[in-house]
């Protein structure tokens, strides 16, 4: 009711302004005709007229009424350049702040609650650089000031910041218009003020904030680097710490552009993806899938059989696959590219110096103009009582350990219902282990939509995985050779006996031992960076899992491009890292692949959407492959074919997703997908049929009805 009352009051004032023709006074002709009378009043009561003028200017600005430009001219004509500028400068800032506060009071809560998800990045930008953005807008009068007042009220910028930035930012423009007002008698129209030369001057004023920002950045840099002595020359253009995906790509780019680069790795080249993650897990998944197909060979018209195999050979194949991929990431390959590869532990000594404890026992110090931190992540191990006593494995350690087993663990517990946990649980179940998967949430794969989680859960259950969702691990116990996990559900404890336990509850960034704390580089679970992947020090960058926000190999490689290019060429041009289109796949069977928004994301963020779904049991190739399980689900902007997000569950889902990733990256809608020829019979046709479902849902029914009548008429 208070908001409604304020809105009615403002509307009444605005209506009265136009009803009593006050707006005619705020035109150039009206101003000229009344200037003599106003001048007489000023001469009689200068303070009273000055105060009344300031108050009227505040009201006009606060109500966002037309005429502020004319009043600025009037201030110059009535009070001269000095006092006219003083009056308008304060009146305009106060009025703008009142308009800002009214907009915030009436609309901010509604806008933020409805569009908060979409405005998240914008709000973060305002919180970080809002004053700079506002200052830029205030300096360039191409942007209507009243609109800036109202829109800024919808953001999270502080009112005090809004006021003082407006006061400073509008000063130059105010001075120009007040000065023009002192020559009011010579002005025939407003175009006399807005001459090409003057407009060019205003545009040039827009460059000033960029210069000011550069100066501010230099001042900040001097403050950050205070206490350090910058080398007069450098051993390297770039030093990269960590040879996972982020580090390898950073070094590759540097070497390609002929920079002198050193890549430092303490353990294995290729990082987690090659040695412990993507490659070994996919090799294991393939072996497990073949075993599964043998058990269900009747689906293909063959005789089903229980697979007999050597578990050691299965694990040996995993290591053979790693060995075959290793040359892609080897020391030799990168050395041949021109990268100086050093095996050892790196530590930052100062913003330009890295000390290396080499694996051969020597200590080496190198300086570089820029440094990229790509130290990766490691499995998170929960603080679970008794865990160390019973022993456990992680996605890092199981590959070497299980390679020594003659057979897979008979009873295996997997802690965690995320992608890693689900992939491992299904694979070992298919290889003969009795797998119990424990997840404290109500469902597995909680980042996906419920229908996706449900289908994945059904698949794991069919493979024999015992799923304990909504169960929390309480403690581990060991009695003799017996190992037990105690879990709690609805206040009741139960016991799960096991022979081996895998912790797959997530991964945490590697932050310790690199000298970050000595340099004051901020960390919040990951290394804190700006949009350019710069840390506290503009010459030190972070990329990959250690930088977040996504722990995917392809994102690490994506970030590495920005980190390397900004590190090497940032003095000329810097690029903001682009996270708009990030795909990912969980390689359970059937695969789960997604890019963009899920339905859950859209609802949580208050984003309106339409959804179309194509079931794979209708796809000819899926039927032929006896794999007709899953769907393609596409979210679009209501009434448009613009893609907001895609989720695919099914065979080859990760491969099928690429077409939608390309479409979203380059702004192609479903009509373009539908109009593309897809080979028959292939899995890729599912994408076209999903686009067809959208087209069918948006068919112009009125036109179709007329066409039906037309064809009936043509038949006679």
Image: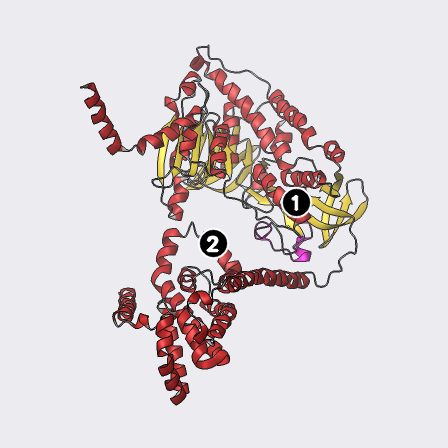
Q: Residues within 10 Å of mark 2 (few under 14, many from 20)?
A: some
Secondary structure type for disc 2: helix
Secondary structure type for disc 1: helix
* Magenta span contains residue 522: yes
Q: Which residue lies furthest to the right in this view?
A: 362
Q: Nearer the viewer, residue 144 or 603?
A: 144
Q: Residue furthest left?
A: 716
Kindly identify the residue that appears in the image at 36 percent across and 52 percent down.
114
Q: Where is residue 636 in the image (x, y as percent from the top left)?
A: 38, 39
* Above or below 575: residue 169: below
Q: In which quarter of the image is residue 38?
A: bottom left
* Above or below 128: residue 49: below
Kindly identify the residue that appears in the image at 40 percent across and 88 percent down.
43
- The quadrant of the picture occupied by the N terminus is bottom left
Q: Where is residue 163 in the image (x, y as percent from the top left)?
A: 46, 70
Q: Is residue 508 left or right of residue 231?
A: left
Q: How was this image coloured?
A: secondary structure
Q: Is residue 34 left or right of residue 502?
A: left
Q: Which of marks 2 and 1 is nearer the N terminus?
A: 2
Q: Where is residue 535 in the image (x, y as percent from the top left)?
A: 62, 53
Classified by dominant secondary structure, the portion drawn in magenta counts as loop
Q: Nearer the viewer, residue 415 or 518?
A: 518
* Above or below 573: residue 289: above
Kindly identify the residue that appears in the image at 72 percent across and 42 percent down.
264
Q: Mark 2 = which residue?
A: 122
* Residue 25 at least partly seen: yes
Q: In which quarter of the image is residue 446?
A: top left
Identify the mark at residue 590; answer none if there is no mark.
none
* Magenta span contains residue 465: no
Q: Mark 1 = which residue?
A: 564
Q: Position of residue 378 (x, y in %)?
A: 60, 41
Specify the segment rendered in magenta: 513-532
């Amino acid at each position: 009711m208070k908001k409604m009352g304020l809105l009615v009051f403002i509307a009444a004032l605005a209506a009265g302004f136009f009803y009593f023709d006050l707006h005619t006074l705020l035109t150039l002709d009206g101003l000229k005709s009344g200037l003599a009378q106003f001048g007489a009043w000023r001469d009689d009561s200068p303070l009273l007229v000055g105060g009344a003028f300031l108050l009227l200017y505040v009201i006009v600005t606060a109500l966002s009424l037309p005429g502020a430009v004319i009043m600025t001219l009037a201030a110059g004509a009535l009070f001269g350049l000095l006092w006219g500028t003083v009056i308008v400068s304060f009146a305009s800032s106060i009025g703008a702040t009142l308009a800002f506060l009214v907009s915030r009071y009436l609309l901010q809560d509604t806008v933020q609650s409805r569009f908060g998800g979409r405005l998240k990045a914008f709000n973060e930008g305002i919180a970080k650089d809002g004053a700079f953005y506002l200052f830029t807008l205030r300096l360039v009068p191409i942007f209507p000031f009243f609109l800036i007042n109202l829109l800024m009220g919808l953001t999270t910028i502080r009112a005090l910041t809004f006021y003082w930035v407006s006061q400073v930012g509008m000063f130059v423009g105010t001075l120009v218009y007040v000065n023009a007002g002192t020559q009011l008698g010579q002005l025939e129209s407003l175009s006399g003020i807005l001459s090409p030369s003057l407009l060019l001057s205003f545009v040039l004023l827009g460059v000033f904030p960029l210069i000011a920002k550069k100066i501010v950045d230099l001042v900040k840099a001097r403050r950050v680097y205070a206490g350090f002595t910058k080398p007069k020359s450098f051993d390297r253009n770039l030093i990269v710490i960590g040879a996972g995906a982020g580090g390898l790509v950073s070094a590759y780019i540097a070497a390609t552009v002929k920079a002198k680069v050193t890549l430092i790795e303490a353990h294995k080249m290729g990082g987690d993806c090659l040695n412990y993650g993507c490659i070994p897990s996919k090799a294991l998944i393939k072996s497990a899938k073949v075993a599964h197909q043998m058990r269900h060979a009747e689906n293909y018209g063959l005789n089903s059989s229980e697979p007999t195999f050597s578990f050691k050979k299965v694990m040996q194949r995993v290591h053979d696959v790693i060995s075959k991929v290793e040359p892609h990431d080897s020391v030799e390959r990168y050395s041949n590219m021109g990268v100086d590869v050093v095996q050892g532990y790196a530590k930052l000594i100062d913003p330009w110096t890295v000390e290396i404890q080499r694996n051969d026992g020597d200590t080496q110090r190198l300086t570089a103009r820029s440094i990229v931190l790509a130290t990766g992540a490691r499995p998170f191990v929960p603080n679970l009582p008794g865990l160390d006593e019973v022993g456990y494995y992680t996605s890092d350690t199981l590959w070497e350990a299980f390679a020594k087993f003659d057979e897979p663990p008979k009873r295996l517990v997997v802690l965690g219902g995320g992608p890693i946990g689900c992939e491992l649980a299904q694979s070992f179940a298919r290889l003969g282990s009795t797998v119990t998967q424990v997840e404290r949430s109500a469902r597995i794969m909680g980042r996906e939509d419920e229908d996706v989680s449900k289908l994945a859960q059904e698949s794991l259950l069919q493979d024999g995985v015992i799923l304990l969702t909504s169960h929390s691990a309480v403690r581990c116990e060991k009695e003799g050779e017996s190992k037990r996990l105690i879990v709690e559900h609805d206040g009741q404890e139960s016991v799960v006996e096991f022979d081996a336990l895998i912790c797959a509850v997530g991964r945490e960034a590697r932050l310790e031992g690199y000298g970050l704390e000595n340099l004051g580089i901020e960390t919040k679970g990951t290394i804190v960076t700006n949009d350019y992947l710069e840390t506290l020090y503009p010459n030190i960058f972070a990329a990959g899992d250690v930088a977040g926000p996504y722990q995917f190999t392809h994102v690490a490689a994506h970030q590495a491009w920005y980190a390397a290019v900004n590190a090497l060429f940032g003095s000329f041009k810097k690029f903001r890292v682009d996270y708009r289109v990030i795909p990912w796949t969980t390689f359970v069977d059937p695969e789960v692949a997604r890019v963009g928004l899920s339905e859950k994301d859209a609802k949580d963020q208050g984003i309106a959407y339409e959804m179309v779904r194509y079931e794979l049991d209708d796809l000819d190739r899926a039927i032929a492959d006896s794999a007709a399980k899953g769907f393609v689900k596409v979210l679009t902007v209501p009434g448009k074919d613009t893609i907001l997000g895609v989720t695919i569950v099914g065979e080859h889902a990760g491969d099928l997703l690429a077409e939608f990733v390309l479409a979203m990256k380059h702004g192609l809608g479903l009509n373009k997908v539908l109009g593309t020829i897809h080979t028959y019979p292939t899995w890729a046709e599912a994408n076209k049929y999903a686009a067809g479902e959208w087209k069918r849902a948006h068919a112009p029914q009125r036109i179709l009805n007329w066409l039906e009548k037309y064809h009936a008429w043509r038949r006679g």
